[in-house]
Image: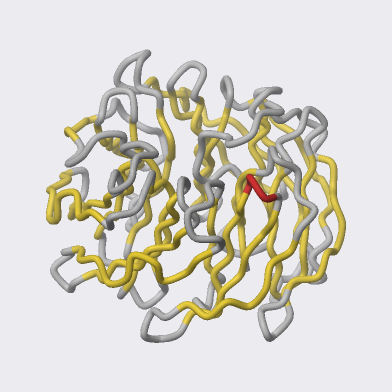
Amino acid sequence: MQEPTERGAVFVQSNEPENRVIALARGEDGVLTLVGSFGTGGAGDGRPHLTSQGSVVLTGDGRHLLVANAASDDVSVFAARADGTLDQVARTPAGTAPKSIAERHGLVYVLSTGKPAVVGFRLTDGRLTAIADGERALSTLDADPAQVGFTPDGAALVVTERGTNSISVLPLDADGRADDPQSIPSSGPTPYGFAFTSGGTLVVTEAFGAQKGAAAASSYRVDGTAVTAVTRSAGNGRSEICWAVVTPDDRFAFTTNFADGAVSRYAIGADGSLSLDDATAGLTVDGRPGLRDEGLTADGRYLYAIDADSGRLFGWAAGRDGSLTPISSWGGLPATVAGLAAR
């Protein structure tokens, strides 16, 4: 059996008609070096700005990389090697237009966006096996879902639904099967990407639009399947906030603003409250659109984000105080690039 991976790497998918994963090795200083590209065997949708968060995901043990192929309706599974290289193990049908994946202890759920639903699998020896009766439809055909994720205790799934401006929770039974969704209205319009603290605080971005000042994030407490709003629509004065990650110490959330090139930092209180700490904690080029998928390394030392419009990947060293210090950027990515997983 393959040993858990330990060396750093960053993975993104090209989302091209012949989809591939672009792998970069991470040095101790956070600098990235291209390892190579690895075909998924599936098809991306070939369009810039894939509407997703979590289309490229590392399993919790670091041994496998899961990639959603939005146009071929399947998920590719790779064995992730210590040197950043990938070996494809399998490709499995997974709903229609899958765009987000969540994994916890070998239980995998894929977000089907063409026919809004979550589809469940077990990951064994690098292969996905469908759970019996493991597909569950979302609230409506107009759900327009963005992301699926597990609650920290693994008791439920959470899905953000842009079309209905709601957050859905799907309880999981002992076999990992999802029950029907229970939905609450989101605090602000267009709930998009989200991330959890270890204690159950849910941070959700609200992608209002590209106009200046139309960017906010909200926080919620999740207890079992009950979701309670804590901080409603904390604005950051920027534009089109979409993606979110939470630091390993649960103190900060970093959000990317697609329309203006800024990474914003929010402070997370012990009570789950959210407050803007720095609207421009990190910048690509101020005012330039294209900043999207982001990922923190497991140790929280480095943050990486895709700037799709410039075809570049940007990196920052993350301080304990939440500060972001630019490392460098790496070019040569296609305009269709999407999804980011970092270790």
Q: Answer whether residue 1 is visible to the viewer in this image.
A: no
Q: Tell me if 2 is positioned left or right of 113 in this view.
A: right
Q: Tell me if 286 is positioned left or right of 71 in this view.
A: left
Q: Answer whether residue 145 is visible to the viewer in this image.
A: yes
Q: Which residue is at the front of the view, 112 or 308? A: 308
Q: Which percent across, then down, holds residue 286?
A: 49, 60
Q: Which quarter of the figure is the C terminus placed in? A: bottom right
Q: Does residue 24 lie above or below 106 as drawn?
A: below
Q: Which percent across, then down, holds residue 251?
A: 30, 75
Residue displayed at 26% across by 60% down: 200
Q: Which residue is at the front of the view, 94 or 282? A: 282
Q: Which residue is at the front of the view, 225 or 259? A: 259
Q: Which percent across, then down, holds residue 151?
A: 33, 52
Residue displayed at 43% across by 52% down: 257
Q: In terms of image quadrants, where is residue 187?
A: top left
Query: Looking at the image, how many numbered discs can be counted on the residues?
Result: 0
Residue displayed at 71% across by 68% down: 9
Q: Does residue 118 lie above or below 255 as drawn?
A: above
Q: In terms of image quadrants, where is residue 230?
A: bottom left
Q: Give the image's coloring scheme.
A: secondary structure
Residue displayed at 57% across by 20% down: 96
Q: Which quarter of the figure is the N terminus placed in? A: bottom right
Q: Which percent across, then down, holds residue 199?
A: 26, 66
